[in-house]
Image (spheres, rainbow, N blue to C red):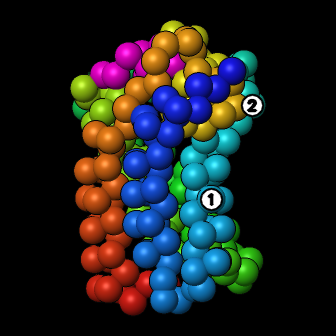
Amino acid sequence: MIRWNEYLHSYIPTVLTWSILSMLLALPNYSITSAFFQTLFILSWSYWGHRIAHMISADYPFNLLNPHVSIHHDHVIDVPRWLNLVLEGFVDFMCFFILCIIQYITGIHIISTSLILGAAFLYVCIHIFDYSIIGRHEHILHHKLTFCNYDPEFMDTLFGTRCEDTPYKNMNHEIIHAIYAFILAMLLKLRFNLD
């Protein structure tokens, strides 16, 4: 059962910030409506991509094909901590950048490259710095239980995949990551004339 008052207070400021900054990355090349739906898609991609990656690579030999599971979770391949973080950052980034590759190969371009890059930078920032280096409780539980706390937490709450029924975590500290990701993606957009 979702506690809506707590949900709105804990999550909405961050989700609105993410959404507005993401939509700004898509403008003016896309309409505001298109930018809105692209942002919804990217937020869903973040959650469902992580969730599905765990589902399809839970067992041998598929776990070896997914570096997120084999290196970051199961430590099937033992690498130094710094290399683990670099590889995980690369995998996190590529989980989004694959959308750019698919659009390039198919010639069907419906999602802003700048928005994709912004989302990739945001995901890497939160996952590497907040979860892997600082070590948030929610991420530690995700490593222990694997099939919960996929993040972002507001989606875990919506889809019933939070590991525990505790007060909702205030996500406002993640706004700064969104600002950094937006600035980096905007600089790339302006420098390379990305859409």
Disc on the earlier residue, 1 or 2:
1
Residue beneath label 1, please? 40
Left of 110 or right of it: where is 88? Answer: left
| Marks 1/2: CA–CA distance | 23 Å
Residue occupying the point 72% across, 18% down:
59
Q: Label 1: few (<14), some or many (≥20) within 10 Å?
A: some
Furthest residue toward front: 5
Q: Quadrant of residue 89?
A: top left
Q: Is residue 164 above or below residue 50?
A: above
Residue 26 got which mark? none
Q: Secondary structure at mark 2?
A: helix
Q: The residue under label 2 is which amino acid type? A: Ile
Q: Quadrant of residue 103?
A: bottom right
Residue 5, percent from left and from top? 52, 32
Residue 122, percent from left and from top? 39, 52
Q: Which range of residues does the magenta coloring cover?
A: 135-143
Residue beneath label 2, please? 56
Left of 65 or right of it: where is 76? Answer: left
Q: Secondary structure at mark 1?
A: helix
Q: Magenta region, mostly helix, strand or loop?
A: helix
Taking the image as drawn, is residue 93 in sight? no
Residue occupying the point 33% across, 75% down:
186
Q: Is residue 141 magenta?
A: yes
Q: Is residue 37 magenta?
A: no
Q: The residue under label 1 is which amino acid type? A: Leu
